Structures are given as C-alpha cells and as structure tokens.
Image (cartoon, grey):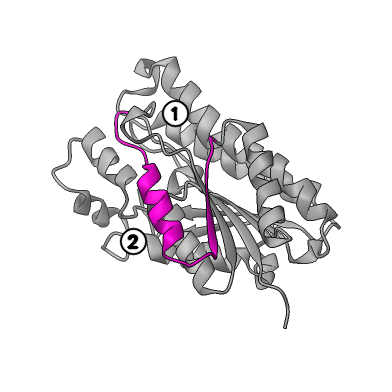
Amino acid sequence: MSPARVALVTGAARGIGAATVRRLVHEGYRVTALDWCLGDEGPTPYPQGHRAQLDALAAEFDGRVTSVVADVRDRTALEEAVARSVSDWGRLDAMVAAAAVMAGGPLLWETPASDLDLLWDVDVRGVWNCAAAAVPVMLSGADPAGCRFVAVASAAGDRGLHRLAAYTTAKHAVVGLVRALAADLVGTGVTAAVVSPGSTRTDMLEHTADLYALPDTEEFAHSQLVRRLLEPDEIAATIAFCCSREGAAVNGSVVHADGGFTG
C-alpha cells in the first residue's frame, strides 16, 4: 500500500481553504492546515479566520490534520510549516496557496496605496513565499513527479473588475507568478497551476457585496452562467484534482472554476 499523499493548505481556517482541507482528507491525504488566525484584529475591514475555527477543523479528522498558525507574508514561518509537514508525515506532495484578502471600493486613482501594499504582500508575496518554501522540498523528495503547486487566484485574474483595481492587479500577478513557476519547473516533474474561482459563498464575498452596496451576495449570481453562487466545496474539488498525480495535465494553466463568470 502506497503512503498517503501530504498537502499543506494556507488560508485554511474557513472558506475555500477549509473546504480544500476537508476534500483532500476525504481523498486520503494528510494535511497541514495553516492560517494566520487574526480574527477581528486583522488588517482588513472584515474579520479574518479565528484560531478556534482552525483547531475545530483539525479536530474533525482524528490526527490526519495538523493546524499551524502562521502568516504567509513570513517566508521563514512558511519554511517551518513545510518542515513540520515533512516531520509529521514524511513527505510533501502538494502546496495549496489559498490565503488571500480583499480590499476595494474606490476607483483606481482614489485607492490608497495601503490597499495595494496589503494585497501585494498577502495575495502575491504570500503565494511567492509558499512556492519558495515548498518547491525545494518537493524537488528533493522521493517523488517530484507527483508533486503539485496550486495557487488560488480569482476570476479577477484575467479581467478588470470595477472598483477592485488593487485586487485585480494582485490576482493577475498570481497568474503570472504561477506561469513563471511552471516554466522554471520544466523537466523536474513538479508542476504548478492556478485555480480561479468565480463568486463563491465565502466571508470575502460578503465583504465584496458591502463594497458594491449590494443587499445580498446572491446578486453576484447574475454574473455567472450557472446563475447561482458557487460553493466552497465545488472549488475545493477542482483544487483537489489539480493536487492529484493526474493534475499534471493542467501544468502552467489557469483552471477557471467560475461557473461561467461574465463580469
């Protein structure tokens, strides 16, 4: 019997990150679930995940999930989390960079530099740090050909969204980062891909509705051909495929798990 595959998932306390942890465990993985767990003390106007949510997630799976509190802006902390994954489970097969924050509302020329700085540091540099911490370990492991790096971007990663200039900029950068990473990995067996969700039922979407002064997140359903919001579990299923050995087929690609997002 082959050993269980091992993944590290960031942004894991709730939303798409937590759904991805659950999906991967149900597919037989052992998972290190990482989140900064800043709660109401985070740098955004909407609450972040809490430590209690992350610990409750780990408790669901009877030793198959380890929770780690760390900030993706801290490369050393990510390197330590990767090392812990290898120490706990003996290997690392997949890194899922799902941690991200949202800021927006003003037009580009009215957007404070602090918004762009925050999104660049968390949404872009955080993904960069995940790759820099995980890829060398994957390359030096016993099975590089089975290793996958997956970043979560957004439908904003290939189009411009009104009053979300900083977020759109950051998600375009995530796409470019992963395409460059896939090019750097040519011939190694390790692969990299992006999953770009559409409007998904998360706390971040609630905040986006507030930015647009919408009465309800259901308003976003009109911008997707499926005419409904996506669920975190649906995005997690796509991410899990990208993490699989078969997921090598989407190397260097953007997988649009967006329900036919039309903007």
Mark 2 = which residue?
230
The correct choice, above or below, for 206 with respect to 60 in the image is: above
Amino acid type at mark 2: Leu
Q: Nearer the viewer, residue 162 or 128?
A: 128
Q: Nearer the viewer, residue 158 or 71?
A: 71
- Residue 182 appears anywhere in the view: yes
At x 20%, y 51%, the residue is: 219
Please provide percent x and percent y for residue 246: 67, 73
Magenta segment, which residues? Answer: 45-71
Mark 1 = which residue?
166
The correct choice, above or below, for 255 with respect to 157 in the image is: below
> Is residue 52 shown in magenta?
yes
Question: What is the number of the mark on residue 227?
Answer: none
Pointer 1 local density, CA inside 10 Å: few below 14, some 14–19, many at least 20? many
> Is residue 234 shown in magenta?
no
The residue lying furthest to the bottom in this view is 1
Amino acid type at mark 1: Ala
